[in-house]
Amino acid sequence: MSIVTVQLGQCGNQVGHELLDVICNDAQEGQRKVYSSASCERFFHQSTHGELVARAVLIDMEPKVINQSISRAAKSGRWRYGEASHFSQKQGSGNNWANGYCVHGPRHRAVVEELVRREVERCDRLAGLMAMMSVAGGTGSGVGTYVTECLRDIYPKSFILNHLTWPYGTGEVIVQNYNSVLTLAHLYQLSDAILVHENDTVHRVCSQLLNIKHISFSDVNRVIAHQLGSVLQPALTADSHGVYSRNPLGELVSALACHPEYKLLSVSTIPQMASSSIAYSTFSWPSLLKHLRQMLISNTKMEEGIDWQVCPPAASERSRSLTAPSFNRSLANLLILRGKDVYSAETGGFEDPALYTSWLSSEAAFNLWKSPVPFNKYEKCATLVSNSQALLKPLDNMVGKAWNMFASRAYIHQYVKFGISEEDFLDSFTSLEQVISSYSQLS
């Protein structure tokens, strides 16, 4: 089954290109016939000349980044984008969600829907759609939300996963918190699951683990692509009987987003290191999984940030608030192991009921995927996709900052003039306050 990727805005197109490049490189490395075939079926189709063509649609209101992505893919010599799989205009959305959602989205709806329809019809069987976007700007967030709304209308029974890149907390755009609130509130009603990468967290990975001195957006995007690729590449599920998973989006959603109040997913990957260090490093499954479990518990995305003092509380201490100690309660976790001796890995630590909410059994809350094929040059690697309280604090901070601006009516007129009312803002705040409340009360 195949995934159609919809790349939206500057960030979505850059991350989407890096993801497809990582997947293509990984699939074509070594003698991996069955693995490679399953991977390519998901993300590429073959042209009449045998070339790998991405099952992707590229959308932006400015042409520069789309042109760069198309050119870089073609120059790789391994894969390319479709010749008529993209759409752009000459004028962006001005970092204004309302401009993207109310103006650009409706204006170009027909052409975007046609591009997606063509890619869907090239699939023998559609596993789902993955929309990749930022929440900070105008096109990725505003047009991205509108396009997701259209996709839900056209494909009501298909799985839709939104991948969101969360802006730096120090600020990339003055109104980024408004854009983020409006995006998340709308997507919560449309998407089956929302997978989030925080730029601040990925930046620390680049600095502290990869030892990159002058970090660029390309460096950040490559880390995101590595983590996403480790989730989306073929793997064996518990009941797959030795056959690679056919519907990765459906199984991801089924494993992690089992309740409509809880759709926010985060990703942790171990190990992560500079490519020059990989050849001189050895890894054992017990060590990797011990560290990854504690990363989950203490809510950190890097080994360097692990707090070994944090442990699951007793049943009598399960209720907590946003200001309580940092134990990270999970609703559901998906552990994905790839590489050498993968079947010998002991994963019982992730089945501990103390990690999970009391109203869902750990057997239902924990899922495990495995693949003996190494991923992206790592002999062994483990990835954890978690529906937990990991995003509770950043979400609460973002909503708080947006509310403070809204209370003083800062920049509201910029949204009103494109058709977003103060009531729309209030509805979005109310929706996200409910999400915050639901996650904070996990026990």
Image (cartoon, helix red, strand yellow):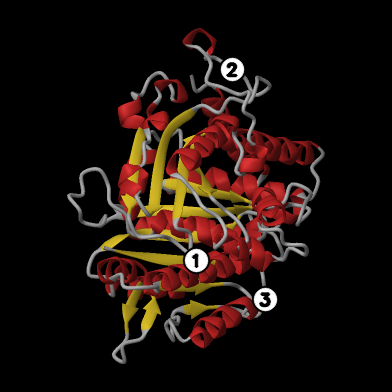
Q: Nearer the viewer, mark 1 or mark 2?
A: 1
Furthest toward the top, the residue is 316
From the viewer's perspective, tell me whether residue 369 is left or right of residue 106: left
Which tag is nearer the camera, tag 2 or tag 3? Answer: 2
Residue where numbered disc 2 is placed: 320
For the residue labelled by badge 1, is the local secondary structure a helix, a strand or a loop? Answer: helix
Q: Counting residues from the N terminus, which is met first, the one under dot 2 or under dot 3?
A: 3
**Could you classify mark 1 by the number of other residues whose Cα lies within 10 Å: few (under 14), some (14-19), or many (20 or more)?**
many
- Measured as percent of width and height from the top left, residue 271 is found at 54, 50
Q: CA distance from mark 3 to mark 1?
A: 26 Å
Residue type of the residue flagged with mark 1: Leu
Between 333 and 254, the residue placed more toward the observer is: 333
Which residue reaches farthest left? 241
Quarter of the view holding residue 47: bottom left
Question: In this view of the protein, which residue sits in the foreground, 305 or 427?
Answer: 305
State the image coordinates of residue 259 (x, y, percent, origin top left): 38, 33
Q: Gap between marks 2 and 3, in whole Å?
A: 47 Å
- Callout 2: helix, strand or loop? loop
Query: Which amino acid type is marked by label 3?
Result: Gln
Res 91 label: 3
Quick check: can you spot residue 102?
A: no
**In the drawing, what numbered circle is on residue 19?**
1
Indicate whether 33 appears above or below 131. below
Is residue 139 shown above or below 415?
A: below
Q: Using a 10 Å C-alpha cutoff, classify the residue at mark 3 as few (fewer than 14 neighbours), some (14 to 19) or many (20 or more).
A: few
Q: Residue at x 55, y 28 (%)?
A: 328
74 versus 373 height, above or below: below
Camera-side residue: 170 or 107? 170
Label 2 environment density (alpha carbons within 10 Å; few <14, some 14–19, many ≥20): some
**Foreground pick, 325 / 162:** 325
Q: Residue 14, how many percent across, how many down?
A: 58, 69
